[in-house]
Image (tube, grey):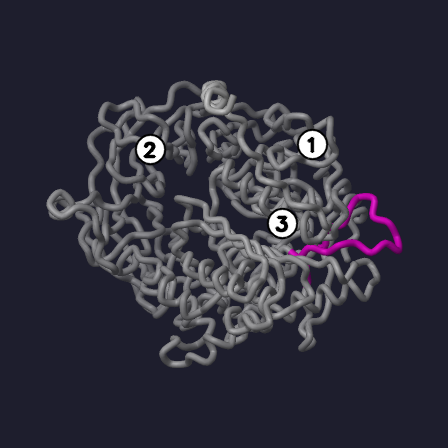
């Protein structure tokens, strides 16, 4: 277990806790002072700060603040700008809808961003993400594009006079004519609209100098990530054969010459090659690569370097045992982020020697979204510490001296939140497993508590001992009601190295369940858990493991399956990411039906006894809804209590606040009934309207 008081001493010594923050941006949650436990609505209303970008001179920073708009039923983001020296900040954009994807011009005079706000230019398609410019000193944002499809990403040219952006092509006339004649239909693995690169020139008055010009075109590839060369004459980009998620393994690297649009492939190794970053001298390009691995879903990715004109790539992180996330190539090395157990840090790679140096501190921080000043001497980033809410920080790169710039945690004042700590135990095969244990602030010695297991998705996700707003599961309310909550980092989780991530290969569900149940047993053995009041819940891969619990164990009193897999065959033939299953099970269902059956929760349905709540998005293509219907019908046929809730119009996630409220309330009521023995609320008969009362009275005097 980790000692939080010791961390506080370290933070005070390095100055982390000493700097005032921009308190005016912290949310004032309604009725916070009246209750020590956040309501579901209050949790949904917690603001968050993210995606910071530092100005080229290192003096200012821009970041996104997410708020909840109940009237529009939306989580919206606007831009804030602050002073690095003082931390003082204020809103830069206040328009309806969201403003995101900030990028400073290299000369520091303008900030480009994307927004789906109502367009200023007549004829702008409603709700489409357009490119905008705004002065860092404030004023009205200027719309630069009026395009039919969303702008996906943007990057300034080094001369601050051009912006490259990507977007998918509009529907061609042939497709529009087809729709007009035959109505809407689609051809599977066809009808693709490729994503391509465009360049727009910016006038000194921050208006488009002319219409955007296409840089890449055709149906041979679809563009992903991209970056300008230091001299502004070329753009390196990744592209795959089509926009389908199942085609991600075909992503290769290309370089386009801006003057004539000539395109050259420079890397074509098996597996995805993405995220190109130029060396400061423009002679080489760093990128993320699967390095030819067939099993890139769970194997370590690598950072490699290739000559800008092509050639044999050189792998630089062969001995680094985690997935590196490439950030930038600075004058003193290549910067990347990586998860380390339940922490996340910034690293610097020496391209000449391959040596790796960890830069960020303290040890137990969770940090990401790093942005550097032009000279790479100052950085901003988002980070959380144990038992703290996420904030924007700044630090000099050498020495690392972090300073907090925001005060989002102020909105949590008045709430008595659960305490989080990292614990560990041995799984049934001896594998060391970690997890995050949530306990009440006033936990009583010798008392046995109900235990709720909340299982993350992924499977390469990871749970960390930091404070986040509750979304799908009202964890703070569960703990306040008297439960312990365990969030296990089961085999396959990120942060523990490639070998650990591969332990559930051809072992999905089986090994995962063993990791969960051994954690439950470890807490029971400590005498702090009531073994007769244990429940489980999770979304996506966490929903799959919860479904496995439903059909494999009678030790849980209630389970909630969120967007989970019940049958790998059903999943395989319906999902939009079939390579996932082929990689983890090392087969298709036609080659090895036995492994698909063995690892499917539905194979154990005869053992199912546990009351199960099923929640699923109607249009969830990653885990298609037939999985939910199959599990519901099987449980119903077996006489097991089951309730299924379908969220109309939603896919991978339930992304709107009102529906997230519904998800959390359903989970709160389900576990209140089966863990705490509370009777479910009876449906209330609506009061008849006055006119209806009068009509009834006339018929029945």
Task: For the residues labelled 3 and 1, say whether their Cβ atoms are less than 8 Å apart.
Answer: no
Checking the image for residue 127, the label placed there is 2
Is 280 part of what is drawn in magenta? no
Q: Find disc 1 in the rendering and name its residue.
A: 19
Q: Earlier in the sequence, mark 3 or mark 1?
A: 1
Can you say whether 178 is above or below 519 in the image?
Answer: above
Can you say whether 325 is above or below 168 in the image?
Answer: below
Element under label 2?
A: loop
- The total of numbered circles placed on residues is 3
Please report the residue visible at 50 percent of the width from the left and 24 percent of the height from the top.
700
In this orientation, which residue lies closer to the viewer: 428 or 210? 428
Residue 428, position in %: x, y? 69, 75
Q: Is residue 441 visible?
A: yes
Q: Find disc 3 in the rendering and name its residue.
A: 670
Q: Residues within 10 Å of mark 1 (few under 14, many from 20)?
A: some
Q: Residues within 10 Å of mark 2 (few under 14, many from 20)?
A: some
Q: Earlier in the sequence, mark 2 or mark 3?
A: 2
On screen, residue 103 versus residue 35, left or right, reads: left
Q: Residues within 10 Å of mark 3 (few under 14, many from 20)?
A: many
- Magenta span: 434-453
In this orientation, which residue lies closer to the viewer: 305 or 320? 320
Please report the residue visible at 65 percent of the width from the left and 35 percent of the height from the top.
39
């Amino acid at each position: 277990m980790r000692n939080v008081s010791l961390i506080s001493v370290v933070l005070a010594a390095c100055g982390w806790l000493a700097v005032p923050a921009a308190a005016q941006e912290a949310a004032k949650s309604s009725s916070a002072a009246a209750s020590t436990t956040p309501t579901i609505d209050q949790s949904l209303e917690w603001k968050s700060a993210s995606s910071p970008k530092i100005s080229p001179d290192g003096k200012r920073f821009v970041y996104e603040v997410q708020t909840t708009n109940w009237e529009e039923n939306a989580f919206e983001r606007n831009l804030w700008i602050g002073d690095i020296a003082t931390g003082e900040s204020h809103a830069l954009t206040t328009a309806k809808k969201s403003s995101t994807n900030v990028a400073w011009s290299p000369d520091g005079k303008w900030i480009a961003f994307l927004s789906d706000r109502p367009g200023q230019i007549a004829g702008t398609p409603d709700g489409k993400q357009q490119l905008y410019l705004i002065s860092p000193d404030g004023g009205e944002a200027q719309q630069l594009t009026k395009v039919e499809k969303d702008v996906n990403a943007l990057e300034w040219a080094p001369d601050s006079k051009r912006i490259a952006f990507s977007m998918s092509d509009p529907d061609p006339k042939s497709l529009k004519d087809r729709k007009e004649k035959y109505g809407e239909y689609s051809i599977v693995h066809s009808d693709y609209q490729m994503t391509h690169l465009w360049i727009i020139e910016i006038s000194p008055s921050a208006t488009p100098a002319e219409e955007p010009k296409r840089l890449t075109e055709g149906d041979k590839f679809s563009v992903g990530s991209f970056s300008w060369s230091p001299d502004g004459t070329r753009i390196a980009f990744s592209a795959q054969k089509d926009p389908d998620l199942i085609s991600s393994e075909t992503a290769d690297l290309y370089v386009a010459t801006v003057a004539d649009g000539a395109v050259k492939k420079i890397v074509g190794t098996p597996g995805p090659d993405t995220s190109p970053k130029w060396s400061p001298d423009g002679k080489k390009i760093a990128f993320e690569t699967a390095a030819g691995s067939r099993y890139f879903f769970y194997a370590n990715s690598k950072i490699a370097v290739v000559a800008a004109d092509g050639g044999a790539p050189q792998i630089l992180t062969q001995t680094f045992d985690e997935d590196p996330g490439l950030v930038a190539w600075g004058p003193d090395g290549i910067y990347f982020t990586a998860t380390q157990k339940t922490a996340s840090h910034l690293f610097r790679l020496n391209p000449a020697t391959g040596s790796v140096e960890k830069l960020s501190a303290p040890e137990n921080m969770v940090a990401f979204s790093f942005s550097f000043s032009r000279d790479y001497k100052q950085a901003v980033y988002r980070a959380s510490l144990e038992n703290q809410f996420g904030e924007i920080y700044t630090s000099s790169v050498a020495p690392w001296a972090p300073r907090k710039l925001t005060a989002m945690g102020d909105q949590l004042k008045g709430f008595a939140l659960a305490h989080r700590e990292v614990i560990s135990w041995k799984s049934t095969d001896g594998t060391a497993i970690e997890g995050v244990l949530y306990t009440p602030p006033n936990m009583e010695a010798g008392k046995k508590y109900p235990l709720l297991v909340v299982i993350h998705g992924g499977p390469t996700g990871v749970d960390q001992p930091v404070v986040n707003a509750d979304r799908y599961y009202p964890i703070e309310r569960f703990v306040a009601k008297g439960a312990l909550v365990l969030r296990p980092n089961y085999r396959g989780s990120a942060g523990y190295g490639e070998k650990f991530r591969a332990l559930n290969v051809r072992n999905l569900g089986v090994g995962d369940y063993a990791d969960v149940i051994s954690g439950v047993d470890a807490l029971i053995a400590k005498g702090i858990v009531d073994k007769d009041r244990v429940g489980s819940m999770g979304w996506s891969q966490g929903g799959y493991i919860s479904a496995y619990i439903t059909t494999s164990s009678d030790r849980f009193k209630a389970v909630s399956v969120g967007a989970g897999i019940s049958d790998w065959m059903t999943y395989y033939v319906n999902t939009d990411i079939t390579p996932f299953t082929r990689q983890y099970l090392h087969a298709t269902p036609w080659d090895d039906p036995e492994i698909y059956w063995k690892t499917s929760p539905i194979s154990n349905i005869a053992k199912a006894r546990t009351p199960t709540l099923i929640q699923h998005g109607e249009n969830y293509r990653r885990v298609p809804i037939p999985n939910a219907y199959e599990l519901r019908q099987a449980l119903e046929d077996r006489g097991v209590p089951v309730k299924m809730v379908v969220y109309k119009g939603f896919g991978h996630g339930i992304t709107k606040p009102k529906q997230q409220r519904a998800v959390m309330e359903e989970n709160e009521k389900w576990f209140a009934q089966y863990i705490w023995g509370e009777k479910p609320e009876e449906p209330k008969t609506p009061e008849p309207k006055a006119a209806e009362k009068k009509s009834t009275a006339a018929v029945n005097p």
